[in-house]
Image: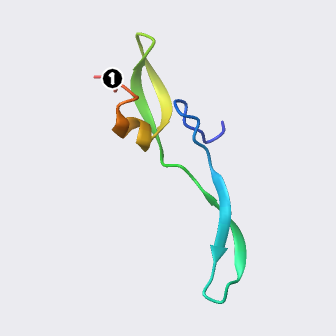
Amino acid sequence: MARKCEICGKKPLVGNHVSHAHNVNKRRFNPNLQNVRTVYNGRVQRMVVCTNCIKSGRVVKAP
């Protein structure tokens, strides 16, 4: 499974490590994804969700 938020679709971005001598290497910026039990379409379901969606209230956590 791809590391992607199931609510907003946030996924890894690509950038560079840049050293003090300006040597450049590729790197990935991964989103902070969490496995959460949520109430989705009236049922309890496990989802992979980014922390921004959890904090903003787009996800209703299951009791």
Q: In this view, does 63 lie to the left or right of 19?
A: left
Identity, as a three-letter code, of the amino acid under mark 1: Ala
**Is label 1 in a helix, a strand or a loop?**
loop
Using a 10 Å C-alpha cutoff, classify the residue at mark 1 as few (fewer than 14 neighbours), some (14 to 19) or many (20 or more): few
Q: In which quarter of the image is the C terminus?
A: top left
Query: Residue placed farthest to the bottom in the image?
Result: 21
Q: Residue placed at 66% from the left, 89% from the top?
A: 21
Q: Which colour scheme is used?
A: rainbow
Q: In this view, does 18 lie to the left or right of 44?
A: right
> How many badges with numbers are in the image?
1
- In the rendered image, the vertical position of residue 24 relative to residue 10, given as above or below: below
Q: Residue placed at 55% from the left, 31% from the top?
A: 6
- In the rendered image, the vertical position of residue 47 relative to residue 17, given as above or below: above
Q: Is residue 38 left or right of residue 63?
A: right
Tell me the residue that label 1 is attached to: 62
Q: In this view, does 34 lie to the left or right of 5?
A: left
Image x and y of residue 47, in percent:
49, 29
Query: Residue placed farthest to the top in the image?
Result: 42
Image x and y of residue 20, in percent:
60, 87
Q: Residue placed at 62% from the left, 50% from the top?
A: 12
- In the rendered image, the vertical position of residue 56 relative to residue 23, given as above or below: above
- In the rendered image, the vertical position of residue 47 relative to residue 28, given as above or below: above
Q: In the figure, residue 37 lies in which quadrant?
A: top left
Q: Residue placed at 40% from the left, 10% from the top?
A: 42
Q: In the figure, residue 24 lies in which quadrant?
A: bottom right
Q: In the figure, residue 61 lies in which quadrant?
A: top left
Image x and y of residue 58, in percent:
40, 29
Image x and y of residue 9, in percent:
59, 35
Query: Residue placed farthest to the left in the image?
Result: 63
Q: Quadrant of the N terminus?
A: top right
